[in-house]
Image (tube, rainbow, N blue to C red):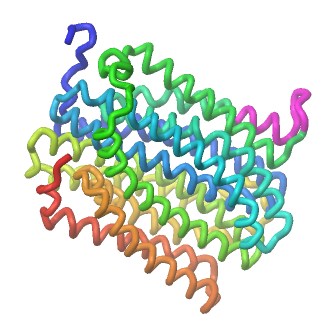
Amino acid sequence: MSAATTPSNLQVEISNRQILKIALPITLALLVPQINFLTNNVFLGWLGETELGAAGITGVYYLVMALIGNGLSSGMQAIISRRAGENRIEEIGATFSQTIRIALLFAAATIILTYLIAPPLLSSVLQSTQVEKEAISFIKIRIWGIPFLYLFQLGNGFLIGTNNSRYLKYAFMTEALLNILLDYVLIFGKWGFPTLGFDGAAYASVAAEIVAVIILAIVIFYKKFDAQFFLLNRIRYNVALTKLILKQSVPLILQWGISILAWLYFYILIENTGERPLAISNTMRNIFGLVGIFCWAFASTTNTMVSNIIGQGKKDKVIFLVKKIRLLSFSFTTLLCLLINLFPQLFLLVYDQQPDFIVAAVPVIRMVSVGILCMSIATVWLNAVTGTGNSKMNLFIEIVAIIIYCFYIYLVINVWQLSLVWAWSSELLYWGILLILSFLYMKSGKWKKKTF
């Protein structure tokens, strides 16, 4: 291995400085698309409550499809981080290349499946004819961004797993700025473009995802990561490595699939109660995305650092590491929750809705904030489980939490017919269960026998 292509030591240290060095660039990378997503919904909110509500349904549906890329990325990231901890650099590129092959096959299947099942599925569960029409039209356009989203997610997982998260910002910022610009132009028909309304947001997102992948590829090749990690040296099909990637990723795909499907079930139950609760719930999803950026950044950091530390043979330091990350995650998230609760009206005003909409939404924000604080701790412990390599345990924990969650929201919304505030209290229940089960597993020490 030549000096020109030898990366610096990839083994991480257990310190707040190391944690923040990985997590803060991820936070910035996550913040940019959340601002983009928020802007998108603001524009749609200007069109009306119907469009804002439809955005909630289509957004959750797209999340269901996107979870495949998330699962592959997280599974790959855990493997790459373990190899980095073991200083087995040559295995990193092979893992990345094989995962890309798998992701593109999944993307093709996802597009075909969407065209076959999305129209009848949405028609059967949505009560509003207008919401149904707009949702089906939107998702048929939006789904073409999936192959590029998967590639983008894998590129991010590669950079995080190799301790290069600081380079995430370039692709994220480009994507967000382009998406916001195209949203404005295509939704409202500016600068000579046709007025596409709700569909304009779909075209804008697809175009932005394509450009983001191009930027990410430029970063990888410009920084010579392709040579440092042998990205193009072992691109031929590798049966053993493919099996390992799928073994780590499929339980995570199923875990998030169950989670997002449960959230889709939640939105369908809310939609059946009226367009106003659905529109309010969509703004709450935006708050989850915006205020929860630190949760997901520190969660991803946990996955990487736990796997890396285990690769170094320091299993006895894992719980100490997780506790340090947990405290930072909770502290940063608390700051954002305080801001959103001190100025909730200011946040809601950007949707250009009526005063009674804002009055109804503020109490829901209070409940959502409590759920997010619980999430800030739960995601760290849950991703510690991911970092150990026992993704089957992640799936088991998720199944238990989702069964209880779905039973609860059915009772609250359909049987007891309680307010939207109580419906959103389900997030506190869900994250609380994930926290308890993940914590108990990590404290049990059973993960120490897991190898890959």
Percent of width and height locating residue 215:
54, 23
Q: Quadrant of residue 194?
A: top right
Q: Quadrant of residue 163?
A: top left
**Residue drawn at x 22%, y 39% as measured from the top left:** 82
Q: Would you say 375 lies left or right of 192 here?
A: left
Percent of width and height locating residue 35:
60, 43
**Residue drawn at x 21%, y 70% as measured from the top left:** 440
Q: Which residues are magenta?
A: 180-194
**Residue drawn at x 50%, y 53% as measured from the top left:** 291
- In which quadrant is the N terminus drawn? top left
Q: Would you say 121 lies left or right of 25 here?
A: right
Secondary structure character of the magenta stretch overall: helix
Q: Would you say 131 lies left or right of 66 here?
A: right
Question: Where 408 falls versus 198 (above or below)?
Answer: below
Q: Is residue 184 magenta?
A: yes
Q: Is residue 267 magenta?
A: no
Percent of width and height locating residue 314:
9, 45
Q: Do we see residue 356 in this rendering?
A: no
Question: Where 116 falls versus 407 (above or below)?
Answer: above
